[in-house]
Image (tube, grey):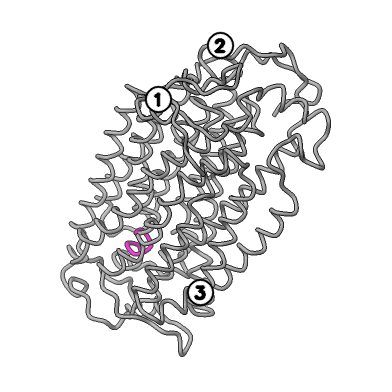
Amino acid sequence: MAPPNSSYSVDAAPSDESGDNEPLIRDVTVPRQCCSARFNLALLMFLGISVVYGLRVNLSVAMVAMVNASRPTPGLNGSAAQACPLPAGENASQKLEQPDGTPQYPWDAETQGWLLGAFFFGYLCTQIPGGYLSGLYGGSLFLGLGVLGTAALTLLTPLAARRGPRWLFALRALEGLGEGVTFPAMMSMWARWAPPLERSRLISLSGNGGNFGAFLAMPLTGFICQALGWPAVFYLCGGAGCLWAVLWFLLVSDDPRTHRRISKEEREYIIATVGQQGGGHGWSVPVLSMMTSVPLWAIVVTQMCFNWSFYTQLTSMPTYMSNMLHFDLKANGFLSALPYLAAWLCATLTGFVADRLIEKKVFSVTAVRKLFTLTGMLFPAVFLLAVAYAGCSPALTVTFLTLTSATGGTGSSGVFMNQIDIAPRYAGFLLGVTNTFGTIPGIVAPIVTGYFTEDHTMEGWRKVFWVSAGVNVGAAVFYTLFGSGEVQPWAVPREDGDADEGRTTVSA
């Protein structure tokens, strides 16, 4: 954090080469970050992303309580190679107790896999439109409506479940439609709000609300399921999302120029450092140039691969911990959620470290993004394999899952903010593109996991972990070869404001 009245040269921009990005002002005063408008925006975004991730993960945990425990399940009565023995003095029904009258459903592993993946069918459809419209009109409206719409639909989950799995599948897909605009809208706003040397910390702080939301949702959902019944989970989470949306619309502005409570010093600092790249991209975007951009494809491929293991953990680990290790989600909720706490802390810390390395010119932006991407892909691959062979030890499993998530959190200062490096003014649109591809694993991974684990054997789960680890390693190699932190030629604004070559108009 910079002290009040300190200054730095805008030459230290987030690009490896100045080229077409020569600063308009050599030195600017850096206002304090604590309690500033940009920090308050990051905090409010953090809370909003925490809410939407809670809305996303709550079904993964509640599913354990929603499914009829008395239904015969192949493999659970087999040998220790199929499932771990119950802890002494426990029985299978204890962890699934519900208040009298709480409905449960006879959904098999395949049905559960489809329901857990349903969200992502909708989620991938609104990423690109949300990013494009956020870049054109500003992101605050779309982020707020995305959270509000998802929260309102969440309130209908118990009703949809009673109507049947097809109804619940459709509802979860609609929730995905609403939430799909949130991250592209967030990135569009940071293109206007984040000074170059503060990008890593601000985007990490706000975006890593996802890990914090998962950390809170897992123990709270387990507790609520057993204390009040699983329907209460969706009523409480949905209500929290609606309340956040009210605060968002009252307090947030798209641009520092129009913010009502920002200081003059902070407004001038942000405008001077962000420069032309902080403006909207207009009605047209250089689609053809983007399609042939190798650094952009490096982000797409790497994000898809990273999300495979992330979504596998997010949607399937509660089932693994409950069915295989016989975790009581109420008693052991904190241990189940500990990996997400570790990821949140590590990701937030590395955001500050990444900014410091760039500010002090220890490494170029490209080197910093590759460094944190490598650590965020290779170390989790190693620890996922350790989980696969931890056997029936809950302590070892939780330890290795925590290390998987903690080291994976460093990737948030790598590939996950690389869009704003290579094309700041198109950051929201590009995040929509990369997140669209990155959402595909959210659909496929739970289904593949359900296929591998339909017999509820340890061998099936080992296949799940091996696939995730292999995908991570492949992505790390690919990004190291082709990733970049430089502003791409097609993303540089022209002085006359006209479209550059290769630009294709996209209608709203």
**Residue that badge 2 annotates:** 18
Quick check: 174 left or right of 278? left
Query: Mark 2 or mark 3: which comes first in sequence?
Result: 2
Q: Residues within 10 Å of mark 3 (few under 14, many from 20)?
A: some
Task: Please name the residue that numbered disc 3 is placed on.
Answer: 156
The residue singled out by tag 1 in the image is 289
Side (left or right) of 500 relative to 308: right
State the residue in front, 122 or 95.
122
Q: Position of residue 120 (x, y in %)?
A: 39, 56
Q: Residue at 75% of width from left, 39% of height from top?
A: 37
Q: Which of 51 and 80 is in front in this view?
A: 51
Quadrant placement of the N terminus: top right
Give coordinates of residue 322: x percent, y percent: 35, 67
Q: Which amino acid does label 1 sit on?
A: Ser
Dot 1 or dot 3: first in sequence order is 3
Q: Nearer the viewer, residue 184 or 44?
A: 184
Image: magenta residue range: 316-321
As displayed, is residue 73 above or below residue 13?
below
Q: Label 1, label 3: how many angstroms apart (C-alpha)?
A: 43 Å
Return the x and y of residue 59 as percentages of the image width and height.
43, 66
Residue 268 sits above or below residue 46 on the image: above
Distance from Cα at disc 2 to Cα at disc 1: 21 Å
Q: Is residue 48 left or right of residue 391?
A: right
Residue 391 lies in magenta, yes or no?
A: no
What number of labels is visible?
A: 3
